[in-house]
Image: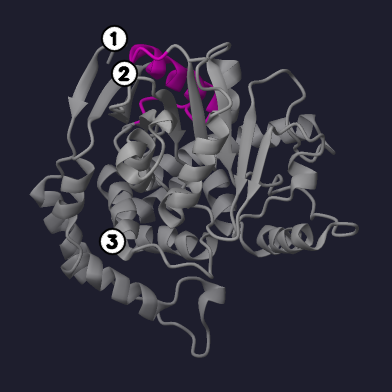
């Protein structure tokens, strides 16, 4: 499809035949034998996944989740040859600040459902109406309804950032703020270069040291940073199997994720357990299964793996070109930067921000990789506080 500036209304409407096919596949699944006396250290335990799959087949109400998704205005537009799906929720407050929210993996636009109301209408949620935002939440190319991906190259996050800048132009937002985590954090960090002069400030959650680089030296680190660094070193040694596979053989993996809903469920459920705050409340299984269902119905397991493959190749090239660099923040002039580090994150400020370039740095004792779902109150509060510094400049 050729590019136009047309913005087309969109509603989630999964065919009943796809729901019936999913249930049939779940009820006919073949299950592996688990060695006695083993648990999560070898992956998702069979008993845990069987229970979750049974609920997905016979207890989970996709139509109810679909209705909740459709309560928010959704659209599709074609940018650089690629359909980009997005939510666009305008605030009732006339002075609201445009805010672009970018998700990561294994997430989706649905990660942000619990923060849309407080961000767009703080008056109705016990907040100050002066903190209101117009919210735009795209699906990354290769994720959810920003599918199919029509050509290679969308793992280039600069290209994604440029497309999102164009999206904001089409919506009439020449100046805006941006927030994201994981892949969305990479997109957010690149937006000031991809849309020069238009990004008022950026906020990311959970930035981490380069995961394929050397282990972090623990000597001299304060106690809190040392604990995070120890967890990072453990993750680097024992938690990167998913990344190695997606970044080297995405198509081989794609057959399992596309043909087996149980395979797709295990692939994502493991990360929801490992990357969320173990001391916090678990993410509601309906929310988890909404995410997994979006991957399943849209084939995003395969396409997102392809995006990660391309992105990691670019990441390795960049790391090779700057060998020895721990990945600190760029020294070039940039808009104000904010960072939120949640309890389960692995970020060590001495490594992520050695020059102290970040204008606003927050660390929280709750939450993890999915803060918009785990601790929406903390994320909303941090965004309100940080973005006050640029209000009035939009």
Marks 1/2 in contact by CB < 8 Å: the verdict is: yes
Q: Position of residue 217 (x, y in %)?
A: 85, 56
* Residue 286 disc label: 3
Position of 160 relative to 242 (above/below)? above
Please tell me how crowded label 2 is: few (under 14), some (14-19), or many (20+) other residues with Cα within 10 Å: many
The residue located at (63%, 44%) in the rendering is 207
* Residue 4 disc label: 1
Rendered image coloring scheme: one colour
Report the mark closest to the observer, 2 or 3.
Answer: 3
Q: Residue furthest left?
A: 16
Q: Position of residue 189 (x, y in %)?
A: 60, 29
Say whether disc 2 or disc 3 marks the residue closer to the N-terminus: 2
- Residue that carries the numbered disc 2 in the rendered image: 78
Who is closer to the viewer here, 272 or 387?
387
Q: Quadrant of the N terminus?
A: top left
Q: Which residues are magenta?
A: 149-173
Report the mark closest to the observer, 1 or 3.
Answer: 3
């Amino acid at each position: 499809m050729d590019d136009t500036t047309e913005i087309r209304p969109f509603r989630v409407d999964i065919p009943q035949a796809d729901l019936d096919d999913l249930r049939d596949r779940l009820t006919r699944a073949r299950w592996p034998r688990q060695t006695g006396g083993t648990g999560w250290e070898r992956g998702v335990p069979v008993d845990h996944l069987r229970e979750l799959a049974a609920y997905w087949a016979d207890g989970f109400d996709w139509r109810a989740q679909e209705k909740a998704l459709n309560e928010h205005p959704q659209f599709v537009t074609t940018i650089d040859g690629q359909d980009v799906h997005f939510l666009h929720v305008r605030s009732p407050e006339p002075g609201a600040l445009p805010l672009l929210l970018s998700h990561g993996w294994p997430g989706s636009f649905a990660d942000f459902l619990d923060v849309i109301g407080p961000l767009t209408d703080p008056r109705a949620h016990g907040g100050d109406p002066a903190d209101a935002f117009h919210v735009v939440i795209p699906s990354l190319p290769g994720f959810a309804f920003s599918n199919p991906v029509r050509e290679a190259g969308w793992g280039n996050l600069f290209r994604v950032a440029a497309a999102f800048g164009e999206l904001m132009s089409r919506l009439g937002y020449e100046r805006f703020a941006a927030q994201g985590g994981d892949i969305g954090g990479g997109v957010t960090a690149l937006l000031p270069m991809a849309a020069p002069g238009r990004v008022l400030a950026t906020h990311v959650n959970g930035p981490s040291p380069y995961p394929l680089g050397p282990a972090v030296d623990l000597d001299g680190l304060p106690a809190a940073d040392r604990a995070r660094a120890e967890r990072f070193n453990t993750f680097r040694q024992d938690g990167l199997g998913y990344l190695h596979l997606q970044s080297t053989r995405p198509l081989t993996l794609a057959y399992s994720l596309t043909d087996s809903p149980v395979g797709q469920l295990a692939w994502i459920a493991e990360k929801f357990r490992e990357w969320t705050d173990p001391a916090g409340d678990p993410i509601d299984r309906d929310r988890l299964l909404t995410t997994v269902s979006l991957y399943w119905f849209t084939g995003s397991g395969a396409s997102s793996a392809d995006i990660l493959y391309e992105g990691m190749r670019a990441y390795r090239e960049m790391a090779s070109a700057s060998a020895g660099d721990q990945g600190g923040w760029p020294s070039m002039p940039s808009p104000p930067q904010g960072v939120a580090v949640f309890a389960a994150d692995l970020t060590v400020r001495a490594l992520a921000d050695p020059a102290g370039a970040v204008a606003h740095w927050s660390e929280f004792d709750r939450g993890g990789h999915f803060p918009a779902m785990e601790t929406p109150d903390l994320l909303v509060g941090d965004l309100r506080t940080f973005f006050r510094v640029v209000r009035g400049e939009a």
